[in-house]
């Protein structure tokens, strides 16, 4: 009963704080805000969280976070999701991907240099991992980092190409993995860096997507000079750092805020008129919504379990793939259901129909999410081999030096 009372007290505290601070940061009901505006709003909300003591719920207080419990982090996330706040990847990449790898593998100086500014919304991040020939098989990447200086102890000179760099055009820093020793097997000759995105030699080219948006980019690196002080972890430890990053990405998969959960879809169905009543009067619709709601709750509880493991310093490993698989499948299914509820307008929406345009964008994005951060097929292989102990696929390049494969 004591824990229940404490948790109820914390939830009430959070609700009061959000009621006082969140409304001014809510996104307007406008169609596709400008990228720069979205990033500015995301920074401002993150700064507000930091001022209120709610940034980095699980990050220790000595590092600028709240140092809270997993239950508190979950409760805050639930209450925050009641508002339509700027919580996109322009902020999330830094919080869920850059900070965990810096905190786990970085030096004390790097932790001090990057954690607090990121938690305060002063720094935004992008991920420079995937390449044209290294997407699902990330370890096949070809971007090279060569040590400068006569004694090989100077800066690193990086050359290569990255692709699908989300929000790189508005990022202050990037997390980068590059090949530093091609004579080793592909997973072993990699090193992890952080890079200032304003460094000379970085060329960011937006990719126009089928939705009309351009939040993905190609990033070309030509003789980009990175100081060794911006190397994270030891030379050759890049794959371990990358796995820390990807684990953070996968176990933090979820809807962003506002109407993106199943509760929002239920309200949408109730507001969608039918011949007599609303779409919610259909038994088939209610069954689909009930199934989606059950999946959402199971996913959230499993996600909380994995986050608790990470908070205790444990490594979830392949188990993180389950959250990613469950979320992206449910997201696509629920977005498709929303389009069906909309009827013919779901295919061709009227001018000014912002709500339907948002659903269309969600559906398009949901398909991309089943590839980003690990394609469904690759993650299922990982689960089969590492958790179910099933025979692995034949890999001809296993233990073969990269420059001979």
Image (tube, grey):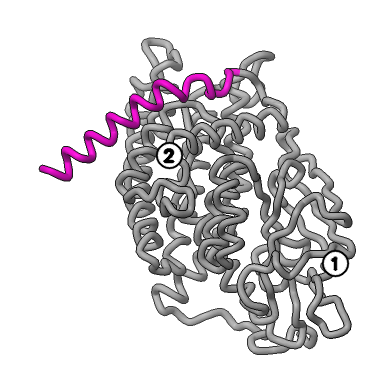
Residue 175 makes an appearance in the image:
yes
Taking the view exactly as shown, the residue that stands out farthest to the top is 276
Judge by depth and name the residue closer to the eye, 110 or 159: 110
Residue under the point 58% across and 69% down? 241
Read off the magenta span: 1-29
Judge by depth and name the residue closer to the eye, 201 or 213: 201
Residue 53: name its quadrant: top left
* Among the two numbered marks 2 and 1 on one chain, the one whose residue lies closer to the N terminus: 2
Kindly check if marks 2 and 1 are in contact, taking CB atoms under 8 A apart as contact: no
Residue located beneath label 2 in the image: 54
Residue under the point 70% across and 80% down? 189
**From what the image shows, is residue 81 above or below residue 387?**
above
Residue 8 colored magenta? yes
How far apart in space, not on screen, are marks 2 and 1 (Cα)? Answer: 39 Å
Residue located beneath label 1 in the image: 159
- Give how far across and how far down residue 167 sits, in percent: 70, 44
Judge by depth and name the residue closer to the eye, 321 or 266: 321
Task: Please rate how many residues cluster around mark 2, counting C-alpha atoms within 10 Å: few if below 14, some from 14 to 19, many from 20.
Answer: many
Q: Please give left or right for residue 104 compared with residue 216 in the image.
A: left
- Give how far across and how far down residue 209 sits, in percent: 75, 40
Residue 383: name its quadrant: bottom left
Circle 1: element type: strand
Circle 2: element type: loop
Task: Please rate how many residues cluster around mark 1, counting C-alpha atoms within 10 Å: few if below 14, some from 14 to 19, many from 20.
Answer: many
Circle 2 or circle 1, nearest the eye: 2
Residue 353: name its quadrant: top right
- Give how far across and how far down residue 331 sits, in percent: 49, 42
- Give how far across and how far down residue 255 sits, in percent: 48, 39
**From what the image shows, is residue 255 above or below residue 158?**
above
Residue under the point 39% across and 56% down? 307
């Amino acid at each position: 009963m004591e824990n229940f009372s404490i948790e109820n007290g914390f939830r009430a505290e959070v609700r009061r704080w959000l009621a006082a601070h969140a409304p001014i940061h809510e996104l307007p009901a406008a169609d596709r805000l400008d990228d720069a505006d979205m990033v500015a709003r995301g920074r401002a909300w993150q700064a507000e969280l930091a001022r209120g003591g709610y940034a980095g719920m699980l990050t220790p207080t000595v590092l600028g976070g709240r140092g809270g419990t997993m239950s508190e982090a979950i409760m805050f996330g639930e209450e925050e999701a009641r508002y339509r706040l700027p919580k996109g990847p322009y902020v999330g990449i830094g919080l869920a991907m850059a900070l965990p790898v810096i905190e786990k593998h970085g030096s004390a100086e790097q932790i001090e240099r990057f954690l607090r500014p990121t938690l305060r919304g002063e720094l935004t991040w992008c991920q420079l991992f995937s390449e044209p020939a290294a997407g699902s098989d990330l370890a096949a990447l070809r971007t090279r980092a060569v040590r400068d200086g006569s004694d090989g102890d100077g800066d690193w000179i990086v050359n290569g190409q990255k692709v699908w760099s989300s929000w790189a055009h508005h990022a202050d820093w990037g997390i980068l993995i590059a090949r530093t020793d091609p004579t080793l097997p592909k997973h072993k000759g990699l090193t992890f860096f952080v890079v200032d995105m304003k460094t000379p030699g970085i060329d960011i080219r937006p990719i126009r997507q089928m939705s009309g948006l351009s939040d993905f980019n190609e990033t070309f690196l030509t003789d980009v000079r990175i100081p060794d002080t911006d190397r994270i972890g030891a030379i050759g430890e890049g794959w371990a750092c990358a796995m820390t990053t990807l684990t953070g990405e996968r176990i933090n998969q979820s809807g962003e805020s506002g109407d993106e959960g199943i509760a929002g879809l239920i309200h949408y169905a109730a507001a969608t008129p039918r011949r007599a009543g609303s779409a919610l009067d259909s038994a088939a619709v209610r069954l689909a919504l009930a199934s989606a709601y059950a999946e959402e709750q199971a996913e959230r509880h499993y996600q909380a379990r994995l986050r608790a493991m990470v908070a205790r310093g444990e490594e979830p490993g392949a188990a993180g793939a389950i959250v990613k698989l469950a979320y992206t499948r449910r997201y696509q299914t629920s977005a498709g259901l929303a389009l069906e509820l909309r009827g013919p307008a779901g295919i061709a929406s009227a001018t000014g129909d912002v709500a339907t345009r948002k659903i269309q964008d969600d559906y398009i994005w949901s398909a991309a999410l089943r590839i980003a951060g690990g394609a469904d097929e690759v993650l299922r292989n990982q689960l089969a081999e590492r958790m179910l102990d099933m025979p692995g696929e034949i890999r001809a390049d296993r233990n073969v030096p990269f420059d001979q494969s």
